[in-house]
Image: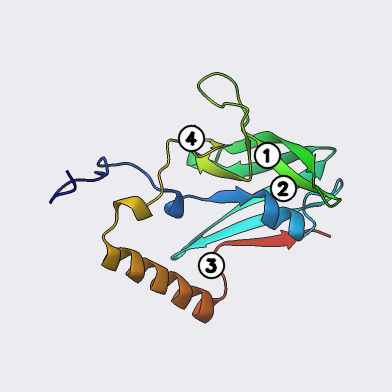
Amino acid sequence: MGGLGSGRWKKPGRRTVEFCRALDANDLSSKGCLQPGWSGACQWAYGNEVSSVSLRCEAEQLHLSWHGGEQEEVTEIIPIVRVPCQLGGSRPYFLCSGDGAAGCGRRVIKLYLSRRCFLCRHCSQLVYASPYEQPWQRAFRRANKLWQRNTQGYAGVHLCPSA
């Protein structure tokens, strides 16, 4: 037990959370994007590739539209649930949309773009990279993330409100 080769083994071809596009309820809420009547665009920058999703928030629903494969328009409605906090206010959560195998209805902070819709980590079958890395790989990835944040600004999601 605990010898050479023990521990978790990453299955080949398994996608990780770190390399997927995500919607974060906390981030969107702090920027005022989950207020009813707000509309704008969300852009992701990954290397030279930039993709965007149009967002529109209505009463407890987030309407998304983007271009999928072969330039077809994809639309999706994500329910938003607000849970009261202990010291006042409320915290927004997304519900994993879909039913059956497509989604579980779980209350989550982040939804990941998987195939043609935004789903939770479990429904998208995503894993975290860190348990499968060697200590030097983990340190290199964390240092690289800090370097990118300091040199290019945050390379994650950028919101563009529409007038």
Number of residues whose C-alpha sits closer than 10 Å to that of mark 1, classed few (under 14), some (14–19) or many (20 or more): many
Q: Is residue 64 in sight in this rendering? A: yes
Q: Tag on residue 122?
A: 4
Percent x, y of residue 82: 79, 40
Which of label 2 and label 1 is nearer to you?
1
Q: Relative to 5, is 69 on the left or the right? A: right
* Identity, as a three-letter code, of the amino acid under mark 4: His
Query: 29 or 69, which is in the foreground?
Result: 29
Residue at mark 4 to residue at mark 1: CA–CA distance: 14 Å
- Location of residue 135 by image quarter: bottom left
Indicate which label's residue lies in the foreground, 4 or 2: 4
Q: Earlier in the sequence, mark 4 or mark 2?
A: 2
The amino acid type, in three-letter code, at marker 3 is: Ala
Where is residue 40? Give x, y as percent.
Answer: 75, 54
Q: Which residue is situated farthest in the bottom direction here? A: 151
Give the residue type that dot 2 points to: Leu
Circle 2 crowding by C-alpha within 10 Å: few under 14, some 14–19, many from 20: many
Q: Is residue 155 above or below residue 105?
A: below
- Give me the C-alpha separation between circle 3 and circle 2: 19 Å
> What's the distance in space between the residues labelled 4 and 2, CA to CA?
24 Å
* Marked residue nearer the N-terminal end (3 or 4): 4
Furthest residue to the top? 100
Mark 1 = which residue? 94
Image location of residue 12, percent across then percent down: 25, 42
Q: Along the polypeptide, which appears first: circle 3 or circle 2? A: 2
Query: Circle 3 sits on which residue?
Result: 155
Which residue lies at the image location 70% right of the left edge and 42% below the top edge?
Answer: 93
Q: From the image, which quarter does the N terminus lie in?
A: top left
31 is higher (above) or lower (below) than 109: below
